[in-house]
Image (cartoon, helix red, strand yellow):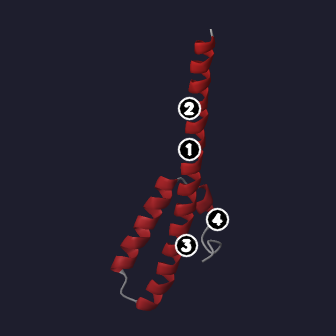
Amino acid sequence: MKDKNLPNNYNSLSLEELTDEANKMIEDLENQKDLENSIEKYQDLIKLNNIIEKKFQKSVKKISEKAKENIFKINSKKNAKRIK
C-alpha cells in the first residue's frame, strides 16, 4: 500500500505525534457505525501504520549508528592510553 494518499504533513510529524494520530483513527473506527466508511478509514490506518513503521526503522538505524560511533571513540581512547 502506498502512503501517498495520506496528508503530506505526516512525514514531518514525530513518531509520538503519528502514534497519537493513529490512536485517534482507531477511536473513530471503534465509534463508526457505517461499514462503508470504515473500510476506507481502516485502509488509511494501515497506510499510517506503514509510515510509523518506516520512521521507527529510520530512528533505530540512527541510534544504532550513533552507538557504533560512540563505541569506536571509546575504544580508540582506550587503545591510545594503552600505547602510552
Q: Mark 4: which amino acid?
A: Asn
Q: Which residue is mark 4?
A: 8
Amino acid under disc 1 = Ser
Distance of label 4 from label 1 (alpha carbons): 28 Å
Q: Which residue is mark 1?
A: 64
Residue at 59% of width from left, 53% of height from top? 58
Where disc 4 sits, the SS reads: helix
Please identify, in this view, whether the residue under mark 3 or under mark 1 is nearer the observer: 1
Say whether disc 3 or disc 2 marks the residue closer to the N-terminus.
Answer: 3
Number of the label disc, if any, that sits on residue 47: 3
Q: Judging from the image, what secondary structure is the residue with disc 3 in?
A: helix
Q: Are marks 3 and 2 in contact (CB under 8 Å)?
A: no
Q: CA distance from mark 3 to mark 2?
A: 36 Å
- Outermost residue on the front side: it is 83
Query: What amino acid type is highlighted by mark number 3?
Result: Lys
Task: Give the labeled residue for mark 2.
Answer: 71
